[in-house]
Image: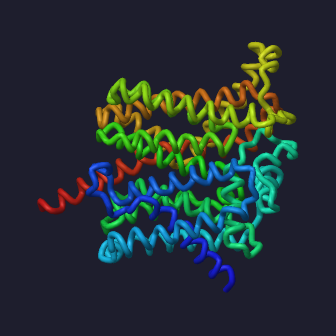
Amino acid sequence: MIEITNIILALFSFLLITFVPLNIFNTKNKIFNDCSSLDLASFNLIINCNILLIFSLLPLAMENYNYIYYTFLILFFFYSYFLKFKNLKDFKSMTLNIIFLASIFFIISIHVTAKLKLGWDAQFFYFIKSLFFIEGQNFYDLNKFQYGFHPHLGSFFWSFYWKLININYEYIGRLFYVFVSCFSLFYICKKNFEDNDFRIIIFFLLVLFFYEYERFSGLQEILIFSFLILLSKYFMKILNTKNILYSIFFVITCNLILWIKAEGVVYLSIMFIIFNLSNKINIKQKMYMSLCFVLIVLFKYMVYEISQNVMLDKTGHPYDLNYFEILNLNFIIFKLKLIIPYLIYYLLNNIFLIFGIILIIYNKYYKINIAYNNSMLLYLFLSTCFIFSAYLFRDMEIEYSIKTTMERITFTISGFYLMTLVNFLTDIVDKFKKIKSKS
């Protein structure tokens, strides 16, 4: 019974950060032109995650600000929705969708709380970092930890919600990962919170195919996967609307990825290239957003390099420039003979990835959504280059490295393909409805 109570408390805590600071029903505001209520909910999630990132960098113990922050969110929620705008009718219109999203979250959470086994990386890296924050230490104490090259943000989210609902169950923090993944899938399937249509079935099917407990065993790939899903929809909105907000949130979502895993800089670089090579985005917008990309990278560099060399212990890091000196053609061919078969195997075992690639080829042949599909082709090329580079230039035993990490890399990358899959499924259903109505 206590687990059910904990999950419900966690759910309300997570839902709150999708409702404030922006009022999700205030879509008539000129600033939010072309934005749906669900768009604004996703903006709120990204805003709050970035605020938590800033908190995580403060030289303060978490207990000094976590309850204050959530008290502010609760007060702002009641002011915005019940005192200022009085959106009670709007809440009623979206009740079914919220209940369905909450139900999926609840079912997955029950399974996560029942198993509790942490993944290998989670046990030795991310869980330990979360304990730093739980025990009253801060970001600047993390340089005591041997494996400093692992970014801290996912561990901070874990500890923040673990500490917020202070009942000494670590899984509460990991339920935040469950919520972010469920919300991101819900976001790309639905146009807004209010509609009750067939897209809810697509959402259910995506959850059914993607869920495995290991995704939520404390590993950080699920967060990057979820944020890549959000980015895929933001990017489509950037190409189809003139609202600059989508570009802004595209960049600050990339900022979150940068602080979750060391590979985050690669995903950010891929997004940067895709953004700047799209011919549907004007030069002025590219210049401003490129400057923002550069600034967020410099900000991380400043934090890591200037702030007393925090977390710069590279001991055990598998990437080393000196490794290039021992590479030769025979060694590269030897590695490729292992990389290619395993890549094909993991590709065929990832339904999102295989269907995403098939649909990109299909859309290219039939010239469907040309601008977006060209960007997806570029993403396919760049992400494939990343996979090969990660193993060709990695100073580790190659077969062991592939067996332990490639499935997670291919899973993470597949997040950006989901928008293409959802578009294809919704188009099929729309065509079926038209045929049925004519008959």
Give the image location of residue 183, x and y in percent.
Answer: 49, 60
The one of 429 and 7 positioned closer to us in this rendering: 7
The one of 363 and 240 positioned closer to us in this rendering: 240
In the displayed structure image, the side of residue 131 where residue 88 appears, left or right = left
The one of 81 and 200 positioned closer to us in this rendering: 81
Q: Residue at x 18, y 57 (%)?
A: 434
Q: Residue at x 29, y 39 (%)?
A: 242
Give the image location of residue 103, x and y in percent.
Answer: 50, 74
Vertical arrangement, residue 203 with respect to residue 341, above or below: below
Q: Residue at x 59, y 27 (%)?
A: 385
Is residue 24 something one can see in this rendering?
A: yes
In the displayed structure image, the side of residue 370 where residue 306 appears, left or right = right
Where, quadrant-wise, is the N terminus in this rendering?
A: bottom right
Give the image location of residue 323, x and y in percent.
Answer: 81, 20
Q: Residue furthest left?
A: 438
The one of 245 and 425 positioned closer to us in this rendering: 245
